[in-house]
Image (spheres, rainbow, N blue to C red):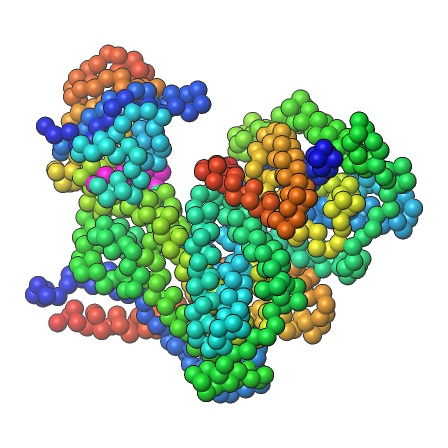
């Protein structure tokens, strides 16, 4: 199995705090890999390091074998790495069409074009339309992002990342804050993601994790605590102790 | 050379008193108050009017200037500023520019546009020789007063309950409210004291910095630089920044007069380059 | 009964309609520009003031590009304006008084200064940017002040003479040529801005304005785009400055002052940011107010401007903009309902 994303001794220290502690992590091609851990374990910090929002104190990050540790955020996206945020990070005043359109223009290398209006890029409307229908945004596509109901915002959050056509997708709690009734929609969108995209998922919702993931890594206090298949982790006594009832949702 | 250092130190201490209020309110309320200099100007004019026209002793006029500016600050904070806290930075900038315009034009109307000459008491004028260094008496006075104030402020900040409540509110306003700290009161008091200190600085500085209606505009950049370069939870940051700026400015104006006016901007650029995360990380 | 492959899906067509919306010239817009042109013919007495309005509008437009579209707060746009003003003034004295090339010189001067200082704006938030822009303008002011042998210092730059436009139309004291010239420049720059803001580049700027974190997370090179628009806005401000020089034929240090930057910002804010017409609307309102106040209290009008500013911000900056949106929306509704009946008719067949 090919490793698409790898970290070698990745560390991040804030003052005296080891937010990420010597993490050696591997994401395989086509993976459905979940990253779990108690609050404050450093999961989002890890994603921030992978995507370049934070600079590591030590260690390396490799994307498809290439060392991307000092490469700028937007360049990592160009190389096929995309992410979503735990708290919706949308473009407030833009509408859904504009938001998706700009990601597509950027991806196709036309983000710099100032001399033509955004709709003249060949096929862009079709691509936007298919993303809108894939993510169930048909009834809100010309609303500004800030006016969307929360569930739709969350779906748009994922759609934006998918519009980058990433090879590696990092999802930070995609179901966070989504009401019970809408969760299945998020889950079905996630399951419908192309199988050649390698996915790392941070989640607290254990139902989602057990339904979606094939492999689980457990992060505790910034360090990799345990790793294995879903069954292995589900039955791991130490993991249960660390969670203190978090895994009881079953 | 040493005289220059001494003068620079005096200038820096003065800048500190003028700016420290802004530093704290900026860190506390996240409010860009470009009108801070207007309070300094108010204090300056109060002192000038009291000493020149009403014969009030200079030393007595200083606390009056402080109180006057503080009261003005309190009134404005409770009536106008409080409505601006939740608004964005652009609104705050425009608002405070409006206040500056009103202040500048108002003072011009009432007092005229000429430089105000302050009549210092006899015993404060002139220089004395200390170990071969020419020491301006007034400047020595400035250093002493500002130094004492700096110490007092730092003690208040670190050793009193008000100080710790203030620091908590700066750190995290919501949490501070959550543990029962009356943040609104803290805002009002801090703003008032900060404005009062600015007024005191304006009064003290009338002799050295000059005083005319354009004061808030002329010195706006100085205050902002001091504030940006320093932190917010202790008085030390603004103090060091002010002293550095004061000495650099005085030295530059003496040795390279043509370049003197640029020094603070060069400092600004240097700081920006050295601290790549931006000057005031809290604001970002 | 759906159509063949060449017809787009209904959703695609809707998407296209949404994307096209900001590109369309509304009836109100066309009416506005027609009126503006007509004003040259029907308001010859007002040409001088109209020239001023056009010039201020371009300056405010330059601020809108960086503030309304990229979210960069600047208190020092006068640096670029003044750079353009002095550059074109000096150009007219030492090289040639030909106006169009003078405009280009102004544009280049503004763009160069903007580009050179843009890297200081990239890091840090609003306060840093305010500081830096203030600082740059203050430095330029000082430089102009100190090099009085070149710039005339506080006495101003004397001896500017501008050749007739296209060798034919003289710049006179009545402003007839001046207004037509300024209006034409405003229109060209406006159309260019319109193109830029609805281009992929322009939309990426809006994304940067709304959420720089997400912008970089979807592959937008945030810093590069900000430098680009700041430079373009610098060129615009430089052109505004050059226009001022050419129509007034005299400039002084005021063009680099904080007052100038504050005025420009204020004009834009009055009209509203982020929709390109804010500068024009604000310039008209500003001139009317200034005229009105100057007649009452010529010396202390700054006082009243300050009061107005405070009240305006307290009451809510968005009110004028919302009013305009509502008006244009109503005009848009009339157009929309007529095109919708066309689509629904087509779908019935």
Residue C178 % position (x, y): 51, 80
Q: Is residue A239 left or right of residue C82?
A: left
C62 in relation to B29, above or below: below
What x and y, as percent, mark residue A80? 21, 41
Q: Residue at x 54, y 60 (%)?
A: C78
Vertical side of C93 occupied by C68: above or below: above
- For this orientation, the residue located farthest to the left is C4
- Magenta stretch, main secondary structure class: loop
Quadrant (top left, top right, bottom left, bottom right) of the C terminus of chain A? top left
Query: Does the stretch in magenta take in A74?
Result: no
Q: Which picture quadrant has residue A231?
A: top left
Q: Residue at x 51, y 66 (%)?
A: C87
Q: Residue at x 20, y 63 (%)?
A: C13
Q: Splitting the image into 4 quarters, where does residue B60 fall?
A: top right
Residue at x 61%, y 72% (from the top left corner): C158
In the image, is residue A86 part of the stretch drawn in magenta?
A: yes
* Farthest-out residue, right: B55
Question: Residue A110 sits in which quadrant?
Answer: bottom left
| Residue B160 drawn above or below residue B82 | above
The location of residue B62, given as percent across then percent down, is 82, 39
Q: Position of residue B284 (x, y in %)?
A: 47, 41
Total count of labels: 0
Magenta residues span A80-88
User: In this view of the protein, which residue sits in the foreground, B28 or A107?
Assistant: A107
Image vertical order of residue C188 relative to residue A164, above or below:
below
Q: Nearer the viewer, residue C241 or C152?
A: C152
Camera sees residue B263? yes
Please indicate, yes or no, whether residue A138 appears anywhere in the rendered image. no
Q: Quadrant of the N terminus of chain A?
A: top left
């Amino acid at each position: 199995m090919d490793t698409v994303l790898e970290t070698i001794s990745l560390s991040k220290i804030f003052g005296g705090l080891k937010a990420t502690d010597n993490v050696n992590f591997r994401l395989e091609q086509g993976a459905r890999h979940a990253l779990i851990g108690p609050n404050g374990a450093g999961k989002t910090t890890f994603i921030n390091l992978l995507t370049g929002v934070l600079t590591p104190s030590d260690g390396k990050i490799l994307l498809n074998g290439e060392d991307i540790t000092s490469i700028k955020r937007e360049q990592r996206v160009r190389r096929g790495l995309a992410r979503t945020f735990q708290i919706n990070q949308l473009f407030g005043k833009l509408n859904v069409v504009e938001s998706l359109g700009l990601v597509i223009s950027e991806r196709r290398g036309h983000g710099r074009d100032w001399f033509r209006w955004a709709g003249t890029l060949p096929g862009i409307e079709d691509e936007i339309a298919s993303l809108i229908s894939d993510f169930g945004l048909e009834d809100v596509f010309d609303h500004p992002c800030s006016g969307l109901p929360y569930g739709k915002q969350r779906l748009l959050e994922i759609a934006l990342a998918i519009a980058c056509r990433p090879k590696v997708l990092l999802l930070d709690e995609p179901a966070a804050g989504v009401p019970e009734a809408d969760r299945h929609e998020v889950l079905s969108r996630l399951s419908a993601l192309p199988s050649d995209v390698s996915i790392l998922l941070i989640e607290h919702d254990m139902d989602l994790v057990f339904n979606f993931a094939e492999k689980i890594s457990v992060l505790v206090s910034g360090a990799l605590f345990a790793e294995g298949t879903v069954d292995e982790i589900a039955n791991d006594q130490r993991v249960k102790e660390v969670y203190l009832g978090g895994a009881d949702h079953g | 050379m040493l005289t220059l250092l001494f003068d620079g130190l005096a200038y820096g201490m003065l800048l500190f008193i003028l700016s420290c209020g802004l530093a704290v309110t900026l860190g506390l309320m996240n409010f860009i108050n470009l009108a801070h200099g207007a309070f300094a100007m108010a204090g300056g004019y109060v002192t000038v009017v009291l000493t020149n026209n009403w014969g009030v002793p200079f030393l007595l006029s200083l606390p009056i200037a402080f109180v006057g500016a503080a009261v003005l600050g309190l009134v404005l904070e409770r009536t106008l500023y409080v409505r601006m806290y939740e608004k964005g930075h652009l609104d705050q900038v425009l608002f405070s520019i409006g206040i500056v315009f009103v202040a500048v034009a108002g003072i011009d109307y009432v007092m005229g546009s000429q430089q105000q000459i302050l009549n210092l008491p006899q015993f404060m004028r002139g220089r004395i020789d200390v170990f071969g260094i020419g020491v301006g008496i007034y400047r020595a006075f400035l250093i002493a007063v500002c130094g004492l104030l700096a110490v007092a402020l730092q003690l208040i900040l670190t050793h009193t309950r008000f100080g710790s409540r203030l620091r908590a509110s700066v750190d995290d306003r919501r949490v501070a409210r959550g543990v029962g700290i009356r943040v609104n009161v803290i805002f009002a008091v801090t703003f008032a004291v900060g404005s009062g200190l600015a007024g005191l600085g304006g009064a003290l500085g009338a002799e050295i910095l000059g005083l005319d209606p354009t004061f808030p505009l002329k010195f706006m950049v100085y205050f902002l630089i001091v504030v940006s370069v320093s932190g917010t939870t202790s008085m030390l940051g603004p103090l060091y920044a002010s002293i550095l700026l004061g000495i650099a400015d005085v030295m530059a104006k003496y040795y390279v007069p043509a370049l003197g006016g640029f020094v603070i901007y060069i400092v600004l650029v240097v700081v920006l380059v050295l601290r790549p995360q931006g000057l005031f990380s809290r604001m970002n | 009964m759906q159509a063949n492959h060449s017809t787009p899906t209904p959703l695609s067509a809707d998407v296209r309609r949404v994307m096209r919306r900001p590109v369309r010239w509304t009836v109100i817009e066309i009416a506005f520009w027609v009126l503006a042109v007509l004003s040259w013919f029907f308001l010859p007495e007002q040409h001088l003031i109209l020239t001023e309005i056009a010039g201020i509008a371009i300056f405010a437009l330059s601020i809108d590009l960086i503030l309304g579209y990229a979210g960069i707060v600047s208190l020092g746009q006068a640096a670029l304006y003044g750079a353009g003003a002095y550059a074109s003034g000096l150009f007219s004295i030492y090289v040639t008084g030909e106006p169009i090339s003078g405009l280009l010189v102004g544009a280049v001067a503004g763009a160069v200064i903007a580009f050179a200082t843009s890297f200081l704006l990239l890091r840090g938030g609003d306060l840093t940017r305010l500081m830096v822009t203030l600082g740059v303008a203050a430095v330029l002011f000082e430089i102009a002040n100190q090099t009085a042998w070149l710039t005339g210092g506080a006495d101003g730059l004397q001896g500017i003479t501008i050749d007739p436009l296209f060798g034919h139309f003289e710049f006179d004291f009545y402003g007839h040529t001046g207004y037509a010239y300024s209006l034409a420049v405003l229109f060209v720059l406006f159309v260019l801005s319109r193109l830029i803001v609805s281009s992929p580049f322009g939309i990426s700027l809006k994304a940067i304005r709304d959420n720089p974190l997400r912008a970089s997370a979807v592959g937008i090179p945030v810093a590069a785009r900000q430098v680009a628009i700041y430079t373009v806005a610098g060129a615009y401000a430089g052109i505004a400055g050059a226009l001022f020089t050419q129509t007034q034929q005299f400039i002084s240090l005021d063009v680099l002052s904080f007052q100038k930057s504050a005025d420009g910002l204020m004009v834009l804010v009055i009209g509203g940011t982020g929709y390109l017409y804010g500068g024009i609307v604000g310039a008209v309102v500003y001139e009317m107010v200034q005229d009105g106040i100057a007649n009452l209290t010529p010396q202390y009008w700054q006082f009243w401007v300050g009061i107005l500013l405070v009240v305006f911000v307290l009451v809510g900056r968005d009110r004028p903009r919302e009013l305009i949106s509502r008006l244009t929306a109503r005009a848009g509704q009339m157009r929309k309902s007529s095109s919708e009946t066309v689509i629904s008719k087509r779908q019935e067949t």
